[in-house]
Image (cartoon, rainbow, N blue to C red):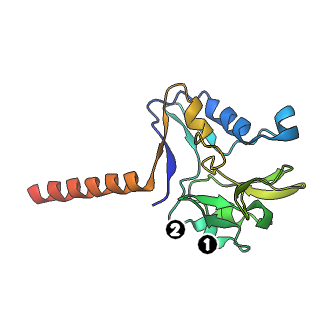
Amino acid sequence: MNNLVICDPGKCIGCRTCEVACVLGHATGDALADLSSAHFVPRLKVIKTSKVSAPVQCRQCDDAPCAKVCPTGAINYLRNSVQVAQRLCIGCKSCMMACLYGAMQVVPRETIVVENQPGTYYGEATGGRVQAFKCDLCLHRTEGPACIQVCPTKALSSISGEVLAERMKKKREYAAATLAQL
């Protein structure tokens, strides 16, 4: 299972601090100096209703429908997460249509390529193209996802694929034990 960021909606106050941290955590060069609306594109979106608020972000799906429909192979698995290789993205919006959670965006980008591993470029692209954009778990940050680090209520946390698999196993065991008592 892939790693992901989870939210406790009971703790989220909808302050959008995570959105700001996301933008600042990915901003480089001119984008950092000019945080206009053109450069303010968080990789997660806080959704507020009358009863709850929580950020919607990539669920790092193990079967990643976005990766399956990508005609250029720009969406791949890297270090227990789903990543977009911006240099391969053509902005066709297939991934956006396939995402079950509405976490994939297609936005105009004018930024710099970020090298996450030698020879493998994931991150922003050069030029003014329209490209797929989603939570990348801040793989470029040694501290981990910026949104988790700044959340004032600690509503956000990171969960590894192994921990998630163990939780699912315990839930299945509980369900089986409950059924056995019927």
Residue at x 15% of width, y 56% of height? 177
Amino acid type of the residue tagged 1 in the rendering? Lys
Q: Nearer the viewer, residue 121 or 59?
A: 121
Residue 1 visible in the current orientation: yes
The residue type indicated by label 2 comes to Asp
Quadrant in the picture for the C terminus: bottom left
Residue at 48% across, 33% down: 155
Residue located farthest toward the front when viewing the structure as drawn? 118
Q: Is residue 53 left or right of residue 172?
A: right
Mark-to-mark CA distance, 2 and 1: 8 Å
Q: What is the number of the mark on residue 68?
A: 1
Q: Where in the figure is residue 119, as x and y percent of width and height?
A: 73, 65
Q: Residue lying at the far left in this picture: please name it.
A: 181
Q: Is 158 positioned to the left or the right of 141 in the image? A: left
- Of residues 35 and 117, which is closer to you in this image? 117
Q: Residues within 10 Å of mark 1 (few under 14, many from 20)?
A: some
The residue singled out by tag 2 in the image is 63
- Secondary structure at badge 2 equals loop
Q: Are marks 2 and 1 in contact (CB under 8 Å)?
A: yes
Can you give x and y, in whole percent of width and height, for residue 33 in the image?
A: 86, 32
Q: Secondary structure at mark 1?
A: helix
Left or right, residue 87 beside residue 181: right
**Up/down of 85 relative to 23, above or below:** below
| Of the image marks 2 and 1, the number of the one nearer the N terminus | 2
Q: Position of residue 152 (x, y in %)?
A: 54, 25
Q: Kindly give the residue lying farthest to the bottom in the view shown.
A: 71
Name the residue rendered at 64%, 43% in the picture.
141
What residue sits 58% from the left and 39% below the top? 143
Q: Position of residue 31 (x, y in %)?
A: 84, 39
Q: Quadrant of residue 90?
A: bottom right
In the picture, measured across the screen, residue 166 lies left or right of residue 65, that is left
